[in-house]
Amino acid sequence: MKKVRILSLDGGGIRGILPGIVLTRLEQKLQERTKNKDLRLSDMFDFFAGTSTGGILTLAYLVPNEKKRPKLTSQQAVNLYLDRGDDIFDANMWDKLRALSDEKYDAAELEDALADNFGEATLSDLLKPCIISSYDIRNGKPHFFKQHKSDNEIFNFKVKDVARATSAAPTYFEVARVKNDLGTPFPLIDGGVFVNNPALAAYSEVRSMTFDGVTPNPSAKNMFIVSIGTGSESKKYEYKKAKNWGMVEWIKPIIDIMMSGNSKTVHYHLKQIFGSLEKKQDRADYHRLEPQVLTADPEMDNASIENMTRLKEDALSYVSQSEVDKELDEIVEKLVKYGKETTH
């Protein structure tokens, strides 16, 4: 059966190293399986979705070089974090003193890293259709960047601006103000405030699309979804402490609760959707991979060299588990199988 192959990546700050390592392993396995060392993730998935750090990774996989091939390998994409993370999340003494009245980090380092890697590429240049989330604070509604709509200049933005907007996490970075090709400004913040796990948004978007070789407006039985988390765990808070929290004390827990809560809720609903399908094979075509943070500090902004190394080691430990390795092999076989069945 022809299926739309979908890759969805959660938000999670510097913990983007975790899905980045998982996808590096997946790309390696795909290259070995197909005996094609030049194969990239964009060759094997038909649609991508990302929020925040997952949005940055998505764009990194899809931005083209001058030959209209992926500019970055999966390893180079995760190196964006390993090479630049400590500069992006570097708060000097003044930043720490003003943190309660302003954003925690200067966005200049983040913007420099995005400009260096994405240049002047626009959404319309990306290699595959995708949806990247953010939130429009002026109009009070979600804002989704859609590559498949970007032939209209109203919906076309520079890739570096899309990445800046989807990762403008409240309290961490100032609001992003980005413009479309017409010059219309949009004040946007991190999509993680409402859809940290964008897999359900991807499912909904694909339902309204047409893909070559696939029934128009495909349903779940015509989809294959790989959703990858960032090791987020639901933190526990004691009633005795929380009952006396004021606005300042609630800021950090609220952000954590929104992100982890949404990720788990989306996973639950997709399990329900795919679990209700008639055929066993179709029910098995939703994969949720959630790397575990074992030795690293799970804080989204702890980008010390030591902690990034631990995040990398935790991710490598995760993919080395026999059951995870087996699932990655299963994903590889399905990607190859469904790729052969679908004509592009």
Image (spheres, grey):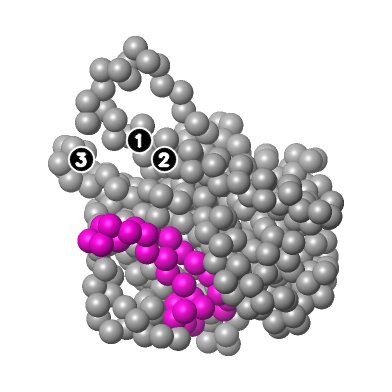
**Residue receiving disc 1:** 254
Q: Quadrant of residue 200?
A: bottom right
Q: Which residue is mark 3?
A: 99
95 left or right, relative to 37: left
Question: What's the residue at 53%, 81% (across, down)?
Answer: 65
Give coordinates of residue 48: x percent, y percent: 57, 66
The 10 Å Cα crowd at callout 3, few under 14, some 14 to 19, many 20 or more, is some
78 horizontally vs 175: left or right: right
Q: Is residue 181 above or below residue 185?
A: below
Q: Residues within 10 Å of mark 1 (few under 14, many from 20)?
A: few
Which residue corresponds to the image point at 25% horizontal and 62% vertical from the top-left? Answer: 139
Residue 139 colored in magenta in the image: yes
Query: What separation in Å lies between label 1 and label 2 (alpha carbons)?
Result: 6 Å
Q: Percent x, y for residue 6? A: 64, 64
- Contact, mark 1 vs mark 3 (Cβ under 8 Å): no
Query: Which of these two is toward me, 221 or 119?
Result: 221
> Residue 232 vs residue 179: left or right?
right
Q: CA distance from mark 3 to mark 2?
A: 21 Å
How many neighbours does mark 2 have within 10 angstroms: few (below 14), some (14-19), or many (20 or more)? some
Residue 258 is tagged as 2
Circle nearer the N terminus (1, 3): 3
* Residue 3 is one of the magenta-drawn residues: no
Q: Is residue 147 left or right of residue 208?
A: left
- The residue nearer to you, when weighing 94 against 43, is 43
Q: Disc 1 residue type?
A: Ile
Q: Is residue 121 visible?
A: no
Range of the magenta residues? 121-150
Q: Are marks 1 and 2 in contact (CB under 8 Å)?
A: yes
Residue 192 vs 242, above or below: the answer is below
Q: Residue at x 38, y 68 (%)?
A: 162
Query: In the rendering, at what x and y percent does residue 106 appear?
Result: 24, 53
